[in-house]
Amino acid sequence: MKSKPGIFFFLDGIEDPYNLGYTIRSLYAAGIDGIVMRQRSWLDVEGIIIKSSAGTSELMLIALVEDLETTINFFKSKNYTIACTGKDEGQSIYQSSLKPPLFIVIGGEKRGINRNFLDNADLRLNIPYKREFVGSLPINSVAVIIGFEILRQRKDSNEIY
């Protein structure tokens, strides 16, 4: 049986276990297929993640990887569109077709996304703000906004997978 193309999020730079749990819960509710993160030990805060995710961390496919470049190359080899988020550059998520197969890279507030990945992404996305704002949204907020925009687009096109 051939698997369907999916939508995966790479959360780079998420540090707080509560925010990770909330993000997992929200992306699970939005129908996202999986989350990819850099390898690190979450064992000492696993209970916090499970509790703040309302148990969805046990249901969501989560992969821990060593290297973002290798991971992106894997998804590219499977014909996934690689999308990176950026505050000022790129196309509004509301004007972008966010259909599978899609691999979305979201950078943390401290480091953002490596310029090499931004320059080589197939798609650059941003979330438009209502007013001029020099800051950036937290990684979990960006993930949730994009996740539910994907759900909205799927519902509008009757493409609930």
Image (tube, rainbow, N blue to C red):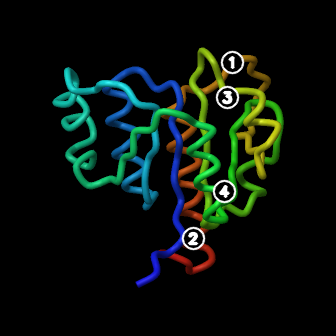
Q: Earlier in the sequence, mark 3 or mark 4?
A: 4
Disc 1, SS: loop
Disc 4, SS: helix
Dots 2, 3 in contact, CB < 8 A: no
Using the numbered discs, state the Cα–Cα distance from disc 2 to disc 4 in whole angstroms: 22 Å
Q: Which is more toward the observer, 58 or 133?
A: 58
Label 3 CA crowd tier, 10 Å (few <14, some 14–19, many 20+): some
Residue at image mark 4? 76
Disc 2, SS: helix
Q: Earlier in the sequence, mark 4 or mark 1?
A: 4
Which residue does the image show at 74% across and 21% down from the upper left?
133
Residue at image mark 2? 154
Question: What percent of the width, then of the height, locates residue 7?
Answer: 53, 59
Height in image: 161 above or below 88? below
The numbered disc on residue 113 is 3
Q: Earlier in the sequence, mark 2 or mark 3?
A: 3
Looking at numbered disc 1 in the image, what kind of residue is underneath it? Gly
Looking at numbered disc 2 in the image, what kind of residue is underneath it? Arg
Looking at numbered disc 3 in the image, what kind of residue is underneath it? Ile
Q: Which is more toward the observer, 68 or 103?
A: 68
Say left or right for 6 vs 111.
left
Using the numbered discs, state the Cα–Cα distance from disc 2 to disc 1 in whole angstroms: 30 Å
Residue at image mark 1? 135
Q: Which image quadrant for residue 134? A: top right
Say left or right for 8 vs 153.
left
Q: Judge depth for marks 3 and 4 and give the one in front.
A: 4
Looking at numbered disc 4 in the image, what kind of residue is underneath it? Lys
